[in-house]
Amino acid sequence: MTEARSIHVRPLVGLFDMSSRMLEMALADVKNADALTRTREGRGSSITYVTGHLMYARTVILNLVGAHEGNAFQDLFGWGVPIREASAYPEIQEIRKEWSELARTFQTVLCGLSDEQVLAPYTGGVPGPDPTIRGTIEGLCWHESYHLGQVGLIRAELGYPTTEELFRNAHESG
């Protein structure tokens, strides 16, 4: 893993890398029909929706730091966008592939940010005590943790091994 240029995001680089790897593991064995299954008797989120939402959020950060334009995930997965019928969403393996590509791009961009970029004022992000780009990136890190837990709960509800079990097995096998 490349070290971050800015000391202000170095702790976040490892956390985002772990989130990326955890989500990839969590998606690897999920069947598409299961990934589209919504919780709470069809009123809650699905693994597909949560993953797309995380891709949307990472792309927001890439836009914010000038590394990307637009957000292909806005219409399906943006903040406040209602969940649609299952047929509106791509297959989970396509989403997993897009997540992997986006995760690599995100890590590269995060590692390349300068102190000036991450300490620039920004008040339009996730509410918190740090009104800078760094604060928004930190908020996104928390946001991802929340949603990774959600994916783990949905997996367990669907009868798949929990993300904790996946992590433990991956750690034990090397």
Image: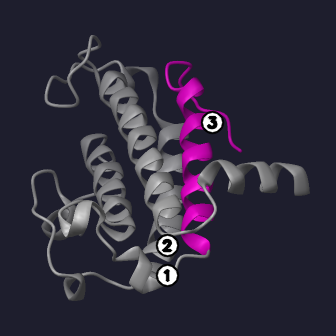
The residue lying at 56 percent from left, 19 percent from top is 7
Q: Residue furthest front?
A: 41
- Decide: few, some or many residues near mark 3? Use Cα within 10 Å; few <14, some 14-19, many ≥20: some
Q: Tell me which secondary structure the magenta stretch mostly adopts.
A: helix
The residue where tag 3 is placed is 14
Labelled disc at residue 96 = 2
In front of the other: 26 or 104: 26
Boundaries of the magenta span: 1-28
Task: Kindly check if marks 3 and 1 are in contact, taking CB atoms under 8 A apart as contact.
Answer: no
- The alpha-carbon separation of the residues under discs 3 and 1 comes to 25 Å
- The alpha-carbon separation of the residues under discs 2 and 1 comes to 5 Å
The first of marks 3 and 1 along the sequence is: 3
The residue where tag 1 is placed is 93
Image quadrant occupied by the N terminus:
top right
Residue 14 against residue 73 in the figure, above or below:
above
Q: Residue furthest top?
A: 129
